[in-house]
Each structure stands twice: as structure tokens, then as C-alpha cells.
Amino acid sequence: MSLIELKHISRSYTLGERSFFAVKDISLNLNEGEFAVILGPSGAGKSTLLNLLGGMDSPTEGELMFDGENIADYNDNELTDYRAWNVGVVFQFYNLIPTLTAYENVALMRDVRANSRKRSVWNKGDIEVMLPEDAIKKVGLEERMHHFPSQLSGGEQQRISIARAIAKNPRLLLCDEPTGALDTDTGREILKLLQDISHKEGKTVVMVTHNSFCAEIADRVIKVKNARIRSDERVENPKDALEINW
Amino acid sequence: MLLRNMLRNLLKNKVQFFSIFIMSFLGLFVFVGMDSEVAGFTAAEDAFYTECSLSDIWVQGKNFSPDDERKVMDIEGVKKAERRISVKGKALLPDREADMYLNFMGSNEISRLSPVSGEAFVPGEKGVWLDYNFADKNGINLGDTVKFKYEGKEFDAVLRGKVRHPEYVYFLRDTASMMPDYGFYGAAWMDESEYPGEDAYYNELLLDVEGIDNRNALSRSEKELKDILDLKIKDVLDNENLAVLDKDDNLSYQTFRAEMEQHKGMSLMFPIVFMIISVLGIITTMTRLTKRQRTEIGTLKALGFSKRVITLHYISYGFFLSLFGSVLGAVAGYRYIVDLVMNMMRNTYLLPGAKGRLTFSGIFIIAASVAISSLVSFLSCRKELSPPPAETLKPEAPKLMKPSWFEKSRLWLSLKFATQWNFRDIRRNKVRTGMGVVGVAGCTMLMLTAFGCLDSIEFITDWMYGELNTAGYQIIMKEDAGYDETYEYASKYKGQMMEVTGADFEVRGVRKSGNVTVIERGSLMNFQGDSFEHQFLTGKGIAMSAKMAGLLGIGKGDFVRWHLTGDDKWQKDRVLQIYANPATQGITMFREIYEEHEYDFKPLMILTNMESVRDLKDDDLITGVQDTKEMMRSMDQMKEMMYMMMGIFISAAVILGVVVLYNQGVLSFVEKSREMATLKVLGFSTGKIRGILQLQNLWITITGVILGIPFGRLLLHEIMADMPEAMDYRAVIFMPSYFYSILGTVILSAAVSFFLSARVKDIDMVEALKGIE
């Protein structure tokens, strides 16, 4: 079943007198529970695509349907609400709040929900925020949960970032180069975590990367170049994340 | 969680945030302290005047008969009228003769006595009631017999009670005095039957009037009512030249009011100055905080926090800091400043039951401070909060800088690296630099005002008793001393004769009370123009004091109508000269001019420098001899008040300077640490880098000092301008004060700069140059 549908989506920017497309006329369907990788070189438009999917930016043209709702026309507040209920984000540089401990960073999600519970159209009454300790347990860092980000290694910070993303039980998990700042072994562990979240918990995971080895673990690989989709292929037998190498 | 985040950020940036807190604290500390003091005194004043039923109108100028009293009482709107004899006499103490204001009255319903100890005053009963200061300071106890002398006649009375009086909240020894010295002279009240003379001369009529309130200043309608009654009183008593006065003409009332106004003005100035600094602090701190936390803001947005929640989070920094600062400042101000100022004021103003009182203004200023701080926080963060998260998650593009014309000039190329570097740093950080300049300027301003206050008092003392009145002594003659007798004394002691009489002045409906001073030619009383230039008193007409001319809105060459209190004709003269005098306002002329107006010259004062006058004893003709040194002594009390004011100003200056400069320095240091680390890596010595930092501090200090001086002069001028109408105090700052203020500011600034720049040696080149993940 299709969770996300992109219809002729474009996003252009103006820089001085020059305007250019970061993504142009992209149409795409993403299914519930799918692990999709968007692959492409720097400047291809993959991060812009991720931002559009996450409601962190709006397209200049086209329709972006999420569960039947066109979020392309959403205003600031509606987009915030969309993010609060549906989207979890994992960043390349983790983006943990340095003044909050690992536990507090994850617990932040309860505040997000509390702030938008009453008015939200996405509040269907069946999406509960995980207890921070449960989310941290899922990423295997319960021993370190009262440490500040500066006391954690890069891999540990990324795990906390994932715990934070999944804590609100999002239907869509977006990952922007999640292994970009990590060594190979740690990167593999993180990928395994994401793969499990998708395959075992049925979450839709979209990962952006320029590393083609990472694409081997996906159910689907969408290649992007010069603001357009160049190929969209389904992978019959995705590899286990712990088996890949780069 | 965001609250925890805020608290940890506050701790992390404690210096900057503390400066915002301390500025809010100080502003409210001084404001609430002084505002509560003014409110407390005003309430006590209202209560005291109401309790004692302060006279609404005083009529002076003739011997009022019981028939006059009745006639005035019959005027519509007059509730009560009371005759009184108010004269100056002496109390004969074992060691000296003290000047006394003697009051004899038949009843005690208007301007009633307020008992401090002993019995209450009962009309018709024998005895005397003394002002409590005089009794206490001279060891006179209840039941003691006190000797008095009036017009050569000695009489005594038993002390029945120690009292306060609503017309004696503030009173001076005589018109030449500038500050009270209670106890050295005093006031006494007795029944009219104690009057020692043969014919009692009731020279005052006190009125209680329907529609004039004892509380607050006179309203417009009350003033109009007084003007109507003025005409009616003159009409029923058939005397055009009576002086009909209200409380605005009363020295005691008016001086106290002016003091309160001055305190009000000063109480407002502090929160404004500190608020400006606080606003600058918030702008720099919050702009930098949000800039540093740009990615964090983007992350929070991406995670689903609404713009409203994030905005509120950043507003709460300014909100909570100014709220806690203001509330704590208000509490501390109420706790400490009120008592400090009130205790000092109690020595000058004899008002019972004054206690600090909180007003709504305090709450209003707290609310305003919190609202401004929150708004400034909001405006400072707005830039980072408005773009979509996709944009905020990326690092900000470097600021676009175009070289200015100066940077393209040849001169630029010839400048040293330190100068170029600092110039560009200032261009990039205008607000931060502005905050430093304002802080230094404020510091210089307050220091200069502090030293200027003391200079002004010293100047006025020297001016009055060293330049204008150069006599060492003043012989005061009895009211009934004839001209020939006074002349005899003047000849014997080589003195200059002088007469000072109360008078009213009027120009185009503006009416003011003051004095007419008439002098014999001589060298002891000198005159100076408005700019202190020496001048000879005109021999062709009248000269007017600068303050009176200002109050009447006239200048040299304009006409003024005037008449002596108790005289039946108005005079009209052109003002030929303007002179400045700190203590006596009105007009001055030579004897022959006075006589041309068909008045008899009746000098009651002789100025002299002959030491032998000290041996003169009071006799039938002389009331006493006043020593100028004694009069100068009374200024010491004022100096004490000024020392306290100086203390407050200098403390505020130091706190302001240290907090602002340190905050500014830390901000600039943190921001420049990468650049400084780079310079270190490139081979610059620590001393060289410190020099660069100190150079910028020097520029800021010089600019601040240059700006602070005129503001200091302006502030001092405002403080002196708030003095009562009878005083013409000039804002004077001597050269050493400029020097001390500048030196003080520079030392403060250099110390902060030295302390901060010492941190350069601790910069870790490796740490500082790591990537900004």
C-alpha cells in the first residue's frame, strides 16, 4: 500500500538573479514498511528530496501526498504538525542537543507530542510515544543514557539520534547520510538498526546516501542525478547490513 | 526538556546572562527604593498635613484685628480663619542666644501643633511648646523654664510639650542660610497671652478653605480658587497689597516637594540607563546564542517542535532573567535603599511616620522591563527562527562584507595589522561594540555626576560666602532700630548696610514671591552675572536674580511689576541687569534707587569684616551677630547627603562599567578565539595578540569617555535644576573631577581588558581549530 506519492514534484531556488532546480519533475511512490535508499552524488538533489518528504521544505510545483493528504500546500504550522506525528529524522551529524543528556534528548519527543496533541489532524489516537528508556534500550545504549552527547562516541550519538527518531513511533523514518561521519564497523551497526526498524517493525525508512555499498541493504534503490530520478529499482534479495563492506 | 536546555544554556553563558540579570536588578533596585521612599514620604506628608490641617491660605501684610478675622470668615468658601503673630526672637540658652521663630496664637485649629511628647497645646494656657529638635539638642526637658527675648524684652515660659508643626517640616535660620541646622535655632509656640509686647501685632491670618485639599500639590482648580479668594480678601479688608499666599509659596512645603520631584526624576533615570544596557546585552547575547544554535533550532523544527514553542523557548531567556532580576532588585531596593535614603532625609525634613511604601509604578516598571526584554529576545532570535528547517539545518553563509572606501584608500594600506583587524572586527560587530561604548559612557557619566555633585556644593559655598558675600560677620539689628542708630554701627564697624524685605513679583499674570534686597554702596556684597563674570550693581535701576527672571520668563530690558509685602502700592521697573545668587531670589538695588521709589531705607543687617563685632552683645538695638563660618557649617549636612549620592553614583558606575565591559569582552573573546588560535599557529606571540584585543578596548574606552562627559554634565545640570525655587544651584565640575572620572573609567576599563586578554595564553590551538560539528 502506498504511503507516500510524489506527483511531478519540483523545487527551485533563486540565488541572486539566477534560479535553479534542486529537484525537477519527480514522481514517485513509497510503500508502507519499505526500506528505500536514495542514492546519488553530491548536489544531485537527494537531500532536497528528503527535506520535501520530511515536511522540512515545500515543493514549488507538484503534489506530495502522505496517506492521502497533499502536504505540498501545507503552511508552516501544518507542516510542523505533520513532522510531529509522522516523521522521524536521523541526521549525518546526529544533531543532538548538547545541553541535554541522551535520555533527555529522547524524552524531548514527549514534549513535541504534548505541544501538538489537541489540534492535530494526524492524532488518530493510536500513536503513542515510546518511553525514552524503551527507545534507548532498542538501540542498546541503556548503560549510557545519562551521559551528555559530548561524552558519547560518534556511533553512540547516532544510536541516540535513532532512538530519538523512533521514540515518537513515526510512520516514516528519514535518514540523511546516517553513516557519513562513522567508521565502517559502526556504520554497519547503525545500518543494521535501521534495517531492523523497517523489516521487523514495519516502518517506512528512507535513507539518503552517496555510498553505493549502503544501497545493497535496501528493498528499493532510487538513483538521483541532476535533480531528476535516473532509475528506480526494486532489490529482490537485500543483503543483511552486517554483511556489507566498504 | 526545553526548560532544562535553557537552564544549562544559562549556566554555560553565565557571564552574558548575568549581565542582563544584574542590569534588570540594578534598575529596579534603585527605582523601587527611591519610588517607595517618595511614596512613603508623600503619604506621610499628606497624612501629617491633613492631621494638622495645614493652612490653605496665609494672608500677610497688616495688623489683623478680630474684625478682619470675622470679615474674612464671612467670605463664601472660607471655613475658618485664625490670627497669629509670627516673629523672630531669641531663646536665651546658658551658653548662647539661639535664633527662634516665635508664634503666638489664640487658637490651634489651622496648622495645628502635633505633639511629640508632653502635653497638647491648649489655647489660653500658659507655657511654651518647642520644636522637639531644639529642645532635645539643647537639653531642655519638659517642665524646664525657657527664657526668650523679643524686641529687647526678656520673658520666660515653662516647657509644656515638644512638638512638630506642618509649616516647620523644613525651615532655615534666615534667608541667607542655605541648609537647615536644626537645634542651632528653633521654633516656639505660645498662647497669645504670653506675647511680651504691649500691642500685639497680628501679622498673619491663616485660612481653612472649602475646596482646597491638604493632600497632594495644588490642582489647577485649587489654584483658581485661591486667586478668586485673593481678590475677595483684599476687597473685604480694603487692602490691595496684602500678600495672599498658598502652600506653593511656603518654603517648608515647597522645598520638600522639590526634593521629592528630584528623587522621582533620579529614580526614573536609573532604570532607563540600565534598561538600555540590558537591551543591548540581550541583543548581543541572544543574537549570538541563536546564531550558535542555528542547527539546534533546525533540529528542533525538524523533530516537530512548532515555531511558537521554539520562539517561546528563546523569549523565555529574556523573560525569566529580567523577571528574576527585576523582582529581586525591587525587593532588595525596598529592603535597603528606602531605609538608607529615608534615614538621611529625616535629618532634613521633620515629618513623622514616614515609612517606605510600594506603588504600582514598581509593578509597572517590572512589567515594562520584562516586556521589553522578552520583545528584544524575540526580535534578536527572529532571524534564525523564521526560515524552514531545511535551511536552518545548514550552516549560515558567511556575512557578505564589502570593503568600505576607507579600506580601499592608501591610508588603509599604511595601517598596522592590529588597527586593520580591529577596524574590521568593529564593522562586523556594531551592536557588541555599541554596547561597550554605551557602558563606558554610562560609567564616565555617573562618575562625573558624582564628583560634580560635590564640586557644585563646594562651589556654591565658596561662591556665596567667598565671592558674593565677602563679609565675615553680619550684625542683625532689631526691627525697631532706627536708621541713624544702624548707620552709627555701620560706621563704627566699617560695615555695609543692607535691607532684605519680602515681595511679590508679577509679569503677564505669572506671580512669584521673593525678596527685595537694598544695599548701601560698599565692597562686601558683590555681584556676578549669569556666567559668574564680575559685575557692578547698576546704579540706574533694579537688577534681578537670574533664577527669578527665569521663573518669570523675562530677561534684561523687560519690565516687572513688584510690591513689598505689606505695602499698598505696586511698582513697575525695567530690569537693567541680571545677576546670579544661589540663596536669595528677587531684585536688588542701591539705596538711592529704592528711595526714588519713595521707600525709606530701613537696613536691618550690616555686613562687616571687623573681628571686634564678635564682642558685641545683644542689646536694645542688636538681635545678634552671625558668623559666616557658622553659616558655612550648615552646608556640611548637604555635603553628607552629596557623599551618599556620590557613593550610589560611583558604585553604579563601577558595576555598570565592569559588567558591560566584561560581558562585551567575553563575547568578543569567545567569537574571536578561532581567529586568535589561527594567529597563534601563524606565529603571533601571546603578547602581540593581547595587544590587539587591548587596542580595541582602548578605542571603545576613548569613544565612551568622549560621549560620557556631555551626558554627565547634562545629568548634573538636571539634578541642580530640580532644586527649589528659592535656590539657584549651579552645576559645576572642576578640572580634577574630569580627570578623576576619566582616570577612573580608564583604570576600570584597562583592568577588565587586562584580565580578559590574559586568557589569550590559555587558548588551545588544537581545540580551537577543530571542525565545528
Image (tube, rainbow, N blue to C red):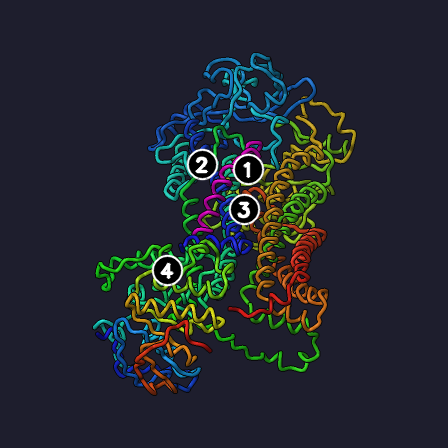
Q: Is residue B624 above or below residue A69?
A: above
Q: Residue at x 58, y 78 (%)?
A: B404
B338 in the magenta segment: yes
Report whether B311 appears left or right of B180.
left
Amino acid type, callout 1: Val
Label 1 crowding class (10 Å Cα cut-off): few <14, some 14-19, many 20+? some
Q: Circle 2 is placed at which residue position?
A: B357
Q: Which of pointers 3 and 2 lies earlier in the amino acid sequence?
A: 2
Residue B629 in the image: x percent, y percent? 72, 34
Tell me the CA gap for discs 4 and 2: 61 Å
Amino acid type, callout 3: Asp
Amino acid type, callout 2: Arg
Q: Circle 3 is placed at which residue position?
A: B722
Q: Is residue B316 visible?
A: yes
Of residues B45 and B320, the one drawn nearer to the viewer in this rendering: B320
Give the extent of the magenta segment.
B320-348
B130 in the magenta segment: no
Camera-side mark, 4 or 3: 4
Can marks 1 and 3 be said to lie on one chain? Answer: yes
Residue B341 marker: 1
Residue A138 marker: 4
Residue B92 in the image: x percent, y percent? 65, 19
Quarter of the image for residue B760 reads bottom right
Can marks 4 and 2 be said to lie on one chain? Answer: no
